[in-house]
Image: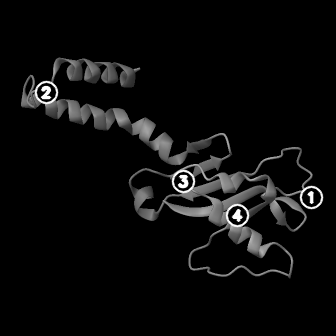
Amino acid sequence: MYIHSVKLINFKSIGNYPEAEIILEPRVTTIIGKNESGKSNILEGLSKIDFIKSNPVAFSQSIINRNSSLSDTQNTYVITLKPTSDEIRRGLVDETKVIITKERCTVAGGFLEFCRQNIMTYFGAIVDILNELGNNPFQLKDQDLVRYRSYKKELEQ
């Protein structure tokens, strides 16, 4: 997957708009615009996105767009991921949206839907292999077997 676009909602002053969507085309490495139009703010907004841990600076009151017509008083970042041609050949055809707010990170579409649809196939293949190996090939403890069976029941629902 690659990042196709990033939408900054209620972030600083990017022109007179409450949101800005930046399309990241392949091999494009410049942002062009008039003075004071928000080019640096776009780059700053992109730098605030942090998937690894909560980034308190990304949601600071000091970077909210005060000129926004939105009643919302928090920043939101929306990242759109698109599949590569290799991923499309494997069946992943829809884009994935990652929506980051101060309270949560939500992922929807594409990749998650692909996993949801295909997990039982892969899980079934693993179960088949384990069944061929015998009753307890890895000398699992009883609680591990109970946990495994409960996961299996949850996934089958």
Percent across and percent down for residue 13 are 85, 65
Label located before the other in sequence (3 or 4)? 4
Q: Which residue is mark 1?
A: 67
The answer to which quarter of the image holds residue 118 is top left
**Label 1 secondary element:** loop
Q: Marks 1 and 2, Cα distance to the nearest angstrom?
A: 63 Å
Q: Marks 2 and 4, Cα distance to the nearest angstrom?
A: 51 Å
**Label 4 secondary element:** helix
For the C terminus, the quadrant is top left
Residue type at mark 3: give it. Phe
**Label 3 secondary element:** loop
Q: Which residue is mark 4?
A: 45
From this view, report whether residue 121 is shown above or below residue 105.
Answer: above
Q: Nearer the viewer, mark 1 or mark 2?
A: 1
Q: Which residue is mark 3?
A: 51
Residue type at mark 2: give it. Asn
Q: Marks 3 and 4, Cα distance to the nearest angstrom?
A: 14 Å
Left or right, 121 with respect to 132, comes to right
Q: Residue at x 79, y 52 (%)?
A: 61
